[in-house]
Image (cartoon, rainbow, N blue to C red):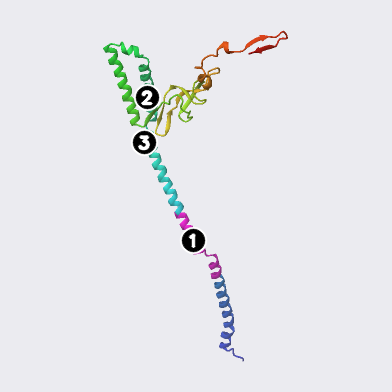
């Protein structure tokens, strides 16, 4: 009876084990190579993180500036509504003082003068209080250029000013900070009226009239012409 050598069984199984181990090692190498190819570039990662950091810092700085601007606007324009309501009071005080002529002031008694001085003092105090809170009066002079951001054209009229300039101020305006609280109501010049003397006519207005005796004698001819003789 033939006996099987146990060493032959071990040798026959070793090549299979060696083949399986080699295949596994090859697969591991392939996997590591694939992972190495898929791994991001460290320099690219660092550059991306730096860009994100710079963007975050810029957004934080912009948010800080916006917050500061909002706080400043809230502080500067907090009294906008109240100041706009007080403009009617300032207008009424100005109208009251403008209704009294110089002749009436000259002939006014002590009681009326005291009243006028009180109204003037109240107007000055109101103006100074508005200015202390950033509210300033805008009252252009005739001839000034029209500013659409500060002036409101209510009408046009002939005036001895350049066309498009301010001819008359109907109502003063007010600004608060850099914003227009109320535009000044003005009349815009449409230029000199038609038929008004120009500069040449005005310069020649003082010249002496020509002497009629120095003009040549004009006689009508029978044919309808005019004969001029010295």
Q: Is residue 90 magenta?
A: no
Q: Identify the secondary structure beneath mark 2.
A: helix
- Pick out the residue farthest to the right: 223
Mark 3 and mark 1: Cα distance apart in space: 45 Å
Residue 47 lies, with reference to residue 160, above or below; the image says below
Task: Tell whether label 1 touches label 3 (CB within 8 Å).
Answer: no
Residue 164 on image: x %, y %: 51, 26
Prevailing secondary structure class for the magenta stretch in the rendered image: helix
Per the rendered image, the range of residues in magenta is 31-53
First in sequence, mark 2 or 1: give its number: 1
Q: Position of residue 75 (x, y in %)?
A: 36, 36
Considering only vertical position in the picture, is 213 above or below 152?
above
**Label number found at residue 86:** 2
Q: Determine the image quadrant of residue 53.
A: bottom left
Residue at image position (39%, 30%) is 80
Dot 3 or dot 1, earlier in sequence: 1
Nearest the eye: 157 or 87: 157
Which residue matches tag 3? 75
Q: Quadrant of residue 2?
A: bottom right
x 37%, y 30%: residue? 135
Q: Is residue 10 left or right of residue 95?
A: right
- Spatial CA distance of label 2 from label 1 is 62 Å
Q: Identify the image quadrant of the N terminus.
A: bottom right
Q: Residues within 10 Å of mark 3 (few under 14, many from 20)?
A: few
- 126, 42: nearer the viewer: 126
Q: Which residue is mark 1?
A: 45
Q: Please state which of residues 2 and 78 is positioned toward the viewer in this rendering.
A: 78
Furthest toward the bottom, the residue is 1
The one of 47 and 6 positioned closer to us in this rendering: 47
Q: Residue at x 50, y 61 (%)?
A: 44
């Amino acid at each position: 009876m033939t006996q099987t050598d146990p060493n032959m069984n071990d040798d026959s199984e070793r090549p299979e084990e060696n083949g399986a181990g080699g295949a596994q090692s090859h697969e591991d190498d392939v996997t590591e190579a694939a992972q190495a190819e898929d791994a991001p570039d460290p320099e690219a990662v660092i550059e991306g993180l730096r860009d994100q950091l710079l963007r975050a810092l810029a957004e934080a700085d912009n948010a800080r500036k916006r917050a500061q601007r909002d706080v400043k606007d809230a502080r500067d324009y907090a009294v906008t509504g109240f100041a706009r309501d007080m403009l009617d009071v300032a207008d009424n005080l100005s109208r009251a003082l403008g209704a009294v002529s110089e002749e009436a002031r000259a002939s006014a008694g002590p009681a009326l003068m005291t009243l006028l001085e009180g109204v003037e003092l109240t107007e000055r105090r109101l103006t100074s209080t508005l200015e202390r809170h950033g509210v300033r009066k805008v009252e252009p002079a005739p001839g000034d250029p029209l500013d659409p951001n500060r002036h409101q054209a209510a009408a046009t009229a002939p005036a001895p000013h350049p066309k498009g300039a301010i001819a008359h101020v109907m109502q003063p305006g007010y600004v608060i900070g850099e914003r227009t609280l109320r535009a000044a109501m003005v009349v815009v010049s449409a230029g000199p009226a038609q038929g008004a003397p120009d500069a040449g006519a005005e310069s020649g207005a003082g010249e002496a009239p020509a002497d009629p005796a120095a003009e040549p004698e004009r006689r009508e001819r029978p044919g309808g012409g005019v004969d001029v003789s010295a």
